[in-house]
Image (cartoon, coloured by chain):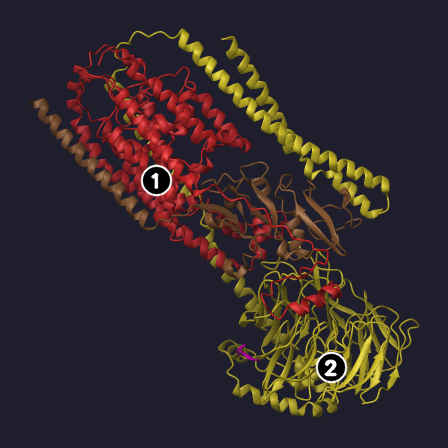
Chain colours: A yellow, B brown, C red
Amino acid sequence: MNLAVVSGIFSLVVALLLLLNFWQVSLNDPLESKSLAALVQRLSEEPNNNELKQDIRNLDLLARKAYFNSQWQVKTGSYLLLFGAVAFALALRYYFSLKARIDLPEQQGENELAARILSQRWLLITGITLMVLAFGASFITVDHLKNFGVDEQAVAEVPAADSGIEVVQVGGQPAAVSGEVPVAADSAAGRETDVSSAGVPTGAAPEKSATAAAATPAPFPDAAQLRANSPAFRGAFGNGIFQHKNIPTDFDGASGKNILWKAAVPKQGYNSPVIWGDRIFLAGATAQLREVYCFDRNSGKLLWTQPVNNIQGSPATPPKVTEDTGLSAPTVAADGVRVYAIFATGDIIAFSLEGVRVWARNLGVPDNHYGHSSSLITWKDKLFVQYDTNKGRKLMALNVATGETVWETERKVKISWASPILIPVNGKYQVVLSSDPLVAGYDTETGRELWATNCMMGEVGPSPAFGEGLVFAGNEYARLVAINPADGKVVWENDEYLPEVASPVVAGGLLFIGTSYGMLVCYDAKSGEKLWEHDSGAGYYASPVVADNKLFAMDMNGKMQIFALSKEKKLLAEPSMGEKITTTPAFAEGRIYIRGKNTLYCIGNK
Amino acid sequence: MDNDKVKSRREFLQSGVRLSLALALGGIGGLAVSRLTGDDYVWQIDPFKCTQCGRCATECVMSPSAVKCIHAYDLCGYCDLCGGYFKPGYNALSTAGENQLCPTAAIERKFIEEPYFEYVINEELCIGCAKCVKGCTSFGNGSLHLQIVHSLCVNCNECSIARVCPSEAISRVKASQAYRIKGGFTQESAG
Amino acid sequence: MKKRICILLAFAFLIVASSVTAQMQRFPKPEFESGYEQPDPVTPEPRALALEYFDVAVLLAALSLASWLALKKRSRQGMLWLSVFTLLYFGFYRNGCICSVGSIQNMTLTFADAGYTISLTALLFFLLPLIFTLFFGRTFCAGACPLGAIQDLVIIKPISLPSWLRTTLGLVPYLYLALAVLYAATGTDFIICRYDPFVGIFRMDAPFLMTVLGIAFLLMGMFVARPYCRFFCPYGVLLNWMSHFSKWHLSITPSHCIQCKLCTTSCPFDAIDYPTGEKTTALSRDSAKRFLVYALLIPVWMAAGGFVGSRAHTWLSKAHPDVYLAELLITRPEVKNDPDNIDVQTFLSSGKTMPQLVESAQAIRQKFYTGSWLAGGFIGLVIGVTLLNQVVFRRRSDYRPNRGNCYSCARCVDYCPVDR
């Protein structure tokens, strides 16, 4: 009996100690120590505080010791408890076996019949209770899965109605804009207009676009209208060529010379301005909120700001991106009816030009270690999204009116940061993408891969360019290639100077590339012969573009080199913005629009 | 006499039921045998599905967890700045406590040659929290990844981590191929 | 957009990367000049297959020995030591895993899930005890089950439970079995393993609640003998059926019962049936009407059970993680903004769409519909038959172990004064 008492008390004490340890650890996990985190936070504010470092090391060691100590305690404690319990059980058994005597058999234990009747009663009670409880539970519980479809339909109906309203409101807009189209641009784009209108009957338009077209007669801008605006990253078709005239070449950001207006952009983003009519569109993001902005082109007034939120599937915390890419690197796209924006979260959204939300969805958070940065581009009723991520590579075409996927094409490539461009081949437009290892063209109607050239390598940043019937693509550490899109054959290649971020541009038979170490190089587009080079001293992140028959190349220091389109190097002017610039400028008649870090500039002759 | 009759009838009934029970058992057993595998099953993590949620450290019936970080050296870049070793806001590229991501200092960093460093996991200290795995997967090659170490795993009939794994990365694998080390085990072969 | 590739590495990469086995390697492995040899990752092999078969052999030996001890040797002492061995081997050494009780779920999953195939060890652990029971009675419970052994060893002062309580609580194992099979078949959960009260003690390592559950069962087991075996164990249901019709069974007396009643207090499990008294036999004839009513009620019970089961399938299926997640996202879409909800966040970044998730959840719920229909019907049948059994009287002249409930622990054998 003594042994039983001793071992019983012993087991009880050990159990209590274990319990204490459990509470302690569950209340305050030494490995998740808050004070340690606070100290590390302080260290990031004062990185050279050696005393603080020492404190952290000591606390860290202490925490680890505490953790392993508690592990050891639990282990030892449970063995002691087992030992104590075994001793207790043995002692008790022994004690009771001494005390036990063979009891006199009781008189017939219980009246069997009475017991059985009692059993029946209890069985009935239990059985019925069980059934009633389960039945009751079935009434209390709601099958929420059934609600899903219903909700979804309701949601689907709302945006459909919205978009209907939108189309009516903005219906007149493209026409008004096209009325302002300068004659020069019109005639220059005449050839393209023919091409596009020829493309419509031949292309087998999917039913969806047909119905959309029927519902809203001719809402899609043609090539000439696109050229008259600046609808996407690097202008119409993403080709880096602007038809606008009278572009000023003399300005100075520091003194404000020829700066017509400056406007503050609320949130940062490395996307470039997009212009439709009198409106400029930008996007910006912080970890908390993503936004799309619309500015008045003439006054710089912020016309509207719309948040990008409440999107089904959008992650609560944005994915990790690097500082130099950010959450809003892709440039928005506009088509005269709507403006479209995509963010590093995979959120894609469409607003009417007045800022009314039309549709939004999440394409699945892109797994991209710098941040998604492929810009958007539209053609007719489709919005093209290059979605080359670490997990899944594809080109998607979304219906511009509803955001539904019209088609998507899986691509056997690696992740890419380049943006899609559109090129006309044999009367039809193709989407051309550049990734490691393929530069490839896709049918805009079906998404079929029309040609693909295995020539690219590494982490592709520069978008392709098109001119002289050739597609040009390049990337640092890889090569610069000219490809004939008719057969996908490489016409010429070179690896002397290679772009890393800035995209090439072709005009007047010349190909220009800007490298991120500050070389601007001109090649003969047809032959690949290097004609001239220019060392600016600062790298090019903004893509060089052509407007008013001049080349505008903005280097990272904010100096803009303006060259004549000629086989000899002819630097016409070198005005400066006075701040670091990494975005590509956009042009309108007589104006340049440039996005700085927090500012949008409008440049024009005063 | 009457009693005997009752008895023999009862016995006959009993043996009949016994026979049918035996047949049922045999049937079930036979059906199961037709789908039998000679190999045993063990639990393992598919590193390509793992999202490093950290539950492996807390949900395992063993403490510390039987899940440990494994280093697939074939994939390692031997970086100086290792995303799996250093805290995001590290103070310096040194082994000092304030820079280390691992809460138990289970990763040993050794200099090999300029500019390469080797990272070795001390399994004794590793608690399977996946902090380093997250760092390595986000900023490096993903050579650090979690695996269930079979000398520690008690191979529960149903793995308590698998039950709560948000990405369903833990599944039964054949005991003859008990590990899914990145590199040899590629994403393609994982299906 | 600045890339972090250091130039050196990138060039090395270019040379290697002629698209051969191009892994997603951002920083290719360097070529070392110092003759460094890379270590291999440490991967200790799992327990050898031979050892798993050795476990089966040990089980077979334990079963044989238990049957011999109970039926031939009639030795309580021997059985006690065998159960100590079982506790040490299958319990503390094998950590309570692999066990026959849990293997029900493996069997179920084998038939329900085409992607799962049972291993030979699990199959034998399921079948062997049942086969032995069919021949020798529940000797498995007495000598070869670690869960039984640990409870058997802590019995100190057992109290006798009234029979109405025993019959009523006796429904619980059926319910548990039905739920375990339902959840295993739908791939939801292995509830027998998850709520196994003793496995944490065997492992000496368990979550807090599991430890509390285990200790509670053991403390209760001091006074209510073998509470888990009697009122929870789902495998016991199958063993009970087998044992009812076993070829041989432990008997209290080696030859003839002399009606000394000495054995009546020996059984801690109330598993000894008394001889039918004269009065009982006489009265039992009156219950023929009752018998008819209960027999006719069985189909009603089954139908009611099936109906209620199928009604309850919505509720039961909420235990499945996919169904739970889908319903959570539908009813409370705001959880999408909760960064601490790992399941929701992982789902959102997985690329799976909401309709896909709902579709799979609905498929699971459909399985639950069929499953709970059957489970409910089974429970109804069990209630009906148990009721019927209450009005069935069998004539007994001796003190005999109840074939279904007796664990063949051989305690009563020690009390019988009759010599061989």
Instruction: Identify the chain of the residue marked 2, using the numbered disc in the image.
Output: A
A258 horizontally vs C316: left or right: right
Q: Quadrant of residue C300?
A: top left
Marks 2 & 1 on one chain: no
Identified by mark 1, the residue type is Leu
Q: Nearer the viewer, residue A565 or B79?
A: B79
Q: A267 left or right of A576?
A: left
Three-letter amino acid code at disc 2?
A: Val
Label 2, label 1: how many angstroms apart (C-alpha)?
73 Å
Comparing A177 with C394, the one in front is C394
Percent from the top left, x then y, of residue A410?
54, 70
Residue A252 in view of the camera: yes
Q: Which residues lie in the magenta part?
A: A446-451
In the image, taking residue C300 as reference, residue C216 lies left or right, namely: right
Pick the residue in front: A16 or C87.
Answer: C87
How far from the left and from the top, in percent, is residue A499?
A: 75, 75
Which residue is label 1 attached to? C124
Q: Which of pointers 2 and 1 indicates the residue nearer the eye?
A: 1
Image coords of residue A402 (percent x, y): 56, 70
Element type at mark 1: helix
Position in image of residue A28 (x %, y %): 67, 34
Q: Which residue is mark 2?
A: A505
Q: In the image, is residue C325 part of the stretch drawn in magenta?
A: no
